[in-house]
Image (cartoon, rainbow, N blue to C red):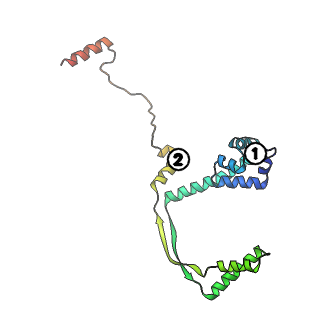
C-alpha cells in the first residue's frame, strides 16, 4: 500500500465518492476495488478513520430507505401513466430553433470549435421529435408476497409463521398405569397380546 493513500479518501471529494458508491448499492468489496485497495484494507480504514465509516453508513442508509419505500409501494399497489411516443417531423421553424440551440450550446462548451465542428453538430440534429400519441393510466395490484414480507418483518409477534404459546398451571392427566413397576406393565402387555 502506498504511504498516505488513505489521505485521498478522507477528503471531501473522496468521501463523496465512497458515499455515492454505497448509495448505488455497491458492496464493501466493490467499493474497495474502486478505491484501488483490498477489502481488508478498507475494513481497517473503517475502524481507523471515522469519516470513511460514516460515509459508507450514510450512503447505505439512503439505499436501504429506497428499497424499503419500493417494497412498501409494491405491497400497497400503485398507478402510473404509460405514454406511447411516435416520431413526428418538425416544422422548418422548430427544426431551425433546435439546430440553433444545439450549435449555441456547443459553442459555449467548445469556444475553440471550427466551422467544420459546428457543421457536424448541425448534421446531428434530427428533423424528428417524439410526440406523445397515447397516454394510459395503469394500475399495479398490491403484491401479497411483498405484504407478507413486510408484515413478518415489521410485526413478527403477530405475523410470523411459528406461534409460541405458553401454558400456565399444570396438566392433570389420569394415567391408570401410574405407579406400576416395569414387570407389572410387561405382564399387562403380554396378557393384552394374547387376547
x, y percent for residue 38? 70, 43
Q: Quadrant of residue 180?
A: top left
Give me the residue at 47% from left, 50% from top.
Answer: 148
- Which image quadrant for residue 100? bottom right
20 or 145: nearer the eye?
20
The single residue placed furthest to the top in the displayed view is 183
Residue depicted at x 28% and y 14%: 186
Is residue 28 left or right of 174 when viewed as pictured? right
Q: Earlier in the sequence, mark 2 or mark 1?
A: 1
Q: Residue at x 67, y 54 (%)?
A: 21
Badge 1 density bin: few <14, some 14–19, many ≥20, Cα 10 Å: few
- For the N terminus, the quadrant is top right
Compared to residue 81, the image places residue 123 above or below, namely below
In the image, which disc is placed on residue 50? 1
| Viewer-closest of 124 and 79 | 124
Q: Mark 2 falls on what kind of element?
A: helix
Taking the spot 66% from the left edge, 81% from the top edge, the residue there is 98
Percent of width and height locating residue 181: 33, 12
Mark 2 lies on residue: 153
Nearer the observer, 110 or 105: 110
Amino acid at each position: 500500500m502506498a504511504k498516505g493513500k488513505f489521505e485521498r479518501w478522507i477528503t471531501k471529494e473522496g468521501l463523496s465518492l465512497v458515499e455515492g458508491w454505497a448509495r448505488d448499492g455497491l458492496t464493501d468489496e466493490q467499493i474497495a476495488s474502486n478505491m484501488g485497495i483490498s477489502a481488508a484494507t478498507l475494513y481497517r480504514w473503517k475502524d481507523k478513520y471515522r469519516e470513511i465509516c460514516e460515509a459508507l453508513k450514510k450512503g447505505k442508509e439512503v439505499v436501504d430507505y429506497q428499497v424499503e419505500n419500493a417494497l412498501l409501494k409494491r405491497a400497497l399497489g400503485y398507478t402510473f401513466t404509460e405514454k406511447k411516443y411516435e416520431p413526428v417531423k418538425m416544422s422548418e421553424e422548430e427544426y431551425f430553433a433546435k439546430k440553433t440551440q444545439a450549435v449555441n450550446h456547443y459553442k459555449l462548451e467548445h469556444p475553440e470549435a471550427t466551422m467544420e465542428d459546428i457543421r457536424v453538430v448541425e448534421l446531428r440534429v434530427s428533423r424528428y421529435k417524439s410526440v406523445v400519441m397515447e397516454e394510459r393510466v395503469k394500475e399495479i395490484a398490491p403484491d401479497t408476497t411483498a405484504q407478507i414480507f413486510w408484515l413478518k418483518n415489521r410485526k413478527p409477534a403477530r405475523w410470523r409463521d411459528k406461534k409460541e404459546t405458553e401454558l400456565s398451571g399444570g396438566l392433570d392427566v389420569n394415567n391408570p398405569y401410574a405407579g406400576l413397576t416395569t414387570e407389572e406393565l410387561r405382564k399387562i402387555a403380554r396378557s393384552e397380546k394374547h387376547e
